[in-house]
Image (cartoon, helix red, strand yellow):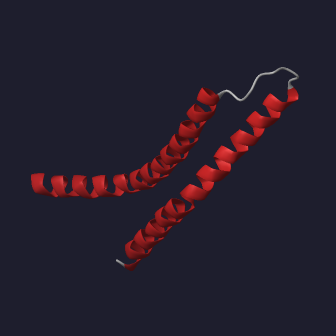
Amino acid sequence: MNESRFTALGIGFMVVAVLVFLPFMIAVGFYTFASIQAIITGLGFSSETLNIPLFLIMLVGTVTLFVVVLHAIVAMVGRSFSPKRKRDRDAVETEATR
């Protein structure tokens, strides 16, 4: 019983930590993209300016990417516990048919 409680606390702590750092990761990811885009735009000797639609699409893409990564982490952790419950259910069904 204590092992599952500590595991649940560990998973809860991990999810809370990722949610706390998610705005920071989004900001760092977006500013990294913005810096690279500025370098690429600034290297050309033309009169082109920053492509605003691309910039906004990448802002939305950066936020979406980190939210999807968070979802994937939570899904993988959740699936790691599924086989245990399935084995318990199969054992109950086996005992019921005896």
In the rendered image, residue 40, in percent from the top left (x then y), is placed at 80, 30
Q: Nearer the viewer, residue 65 or 89?
A: 65
Q: Determine the image quadrant of residue 9.
A: bottom left
Residue in the picture at 87% in, 29% down: 43
Looking at the image, how many numbered discs can be counted on the residues? 0
Q: Along the horizontal axis of the image, is 17 left or right of 31?
A: left
The answer to whether any part of residue 63 appears in the image is yes
Q: Does residue 73 lie above or below 64 as drawn? A: below
Q: Determine the image quadrant of residue 8.
A: bottom left
Q: Nearer the viewer, residue 96 or 71?
A: 71
In the rendered image, residue 85, in percent from the top left (x then y), is placed at 30, 57
Residue in the picture at 58% in, 41% down: 62
Q: Along the horizontal axis of the image, is 31 left or right of 90?
A: right
In the rendered image, residue 98, in percent from the top left (x then y), is placed at 11, 54
Q: Along the horizontal axis of the image, is 37 left or right of 68?
A: right
The answer to whether any part of residue 98 appears in the image is no
Residue at the limit of the structure toward the left, as seen here: 97
Q: Nearer the viewer, residue 51 or 13?
A: 51
In the rendered image, residue 72, in percent from the top left (x then y), is placed at 48, 46
Residue at the limit of the structure toward the bottom, as seen here: 2
Residue in the picture at 53% in, 38% down: 60
Residue in the picture at 39% in, 79% down: 2
Q: Does residue 92 lie above or below 66 as drawn? A: below
Residue at the limit of the structure toward the front, as seen here: 47
Q: Quadrant of the N terminus?
A: bottom left
